[in-house]
Amino acid sequence: MTLPVDIPVSSSVSEVLDTVSIREGGFSDILHSIGDAKPVKDLFAEAGPRKAWHAEHADVLARCDLSEQHVHLFPKVGLRIIAVWKRTVKGPTLADIKADDGMVPVFSNSLAPVIRSVLGENLSSGGFAVITTPRRRHKERNFACMVAASLAQNLGIPYREDVAIARTKQRIGVDFEPGNIPPETNLICFDDFVTTGSTLGAMNRLLAPLGKNIFYIVGVDNQ
């Protein structure tokens, strides 16, 4: 269980960003200036093989009705991640959402205003691109890639495809290999759903040593 911090979408955020240099300080300065989220130990958390199985099948088990946005910042695997929705008891499964092409603009149009509110005028300074996590199970029609491409168009910045390569379909304890590493310094890394955060952690291990500033945003916080 995590303790999320709601992010105010207001002019006060832009005022904070005016004092931040992304290229020098990275995105961590921006996120820390918005709020500090501390993890809370979940006494009922699953462990061992059961936890791993649930993480591998998270998109089948979980649901989200997407009826109400709950933009929040939460810590996971040492990263600070922004999510737009939280999982719900009712509604379509995450697998159903990923199978529906009509959900691509829903995600893109919901995420773009959040990114603009957090990054403000920095987006227009150049050196930004949208990326996403590797294609694993769905090589041809990949929901995260479709949303990332739409999101980049929405924001008016490039979408860089296949930045990271996964040699296996495994989600837990995986490391990625470099693919088409973007020339841009500031990367907006999108993932459709996050459960353990293992995938985003692998993205960070790949890109941070290359001097990239990485801003992590997901559609659904599956916790």
Image (tube, rainbow, N blue to C red):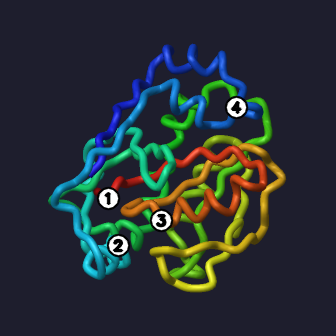
Q: Mark 3 points at which residue?
A: 198
User: For the C terminus, which image quadrant?
Assistant: bottom left
The mark that comes first in sequence, 1 or 2, is 2
Which type of secondary structure does the marked residue at label 1 adopt?
A: loop
Residue 45 horizontal/vertical position (percent): 22, 62
Q: Mark 1 points at which residue?
A: 222
Mark 1–mark 4 distance (CA, rounded to whole Å): 30 Å
Mark 2: few/some/many CA within 10 Å (<14, 14-19, 20+): many
Splitting the image into 4 quarters, where does residue 120 fall?
Answer: top right
The mark that comes first in sequence, 1 or 4, is 4
Contact check, label 1 and label 4, Cβ < 8 Å: no
Residue 18 horizontal/vertical position (percent): 65, 17
Mark 2–mark 4 distance (CA, rounded to whole Å): 33 Å
Which type of secondary structure does the marked residue at label 4 adopt?
A: helix
Could you tell me the amino acid type at mark 4? Gly
The residue drawn where x is 72% and y is 26% is 21
Residue nearest the viewer, comparing 112 with 35: 35
The mark that comes first in sequence, 3 or 2, is 2
Mark 3–mark 2 distance (CA, rounded to whole Å): 9 Å
Mark 1–mark 3 distance (CA, rounded to whole Å): 13 Å
Mark 4–mark 3 distance (CA, rounded to whole Å): 24 Å
Could you tell me the amino acid type at mark 2? Ala
The residue drawn where x is 60% and y is 30% is 29
Q: Mark 4 points at which residue?
A: 25
Residue 215 horizontal/vertical position (percent): 59, 44
Contact check, label 1 and label 2, Cβ < 8 Å: no
Q: Mark 2 points at which residue?
A: 55
Could you tell me the amino acid type at mark 3? Ser
The mark that comes first in sequence, 1 or 3, is 3
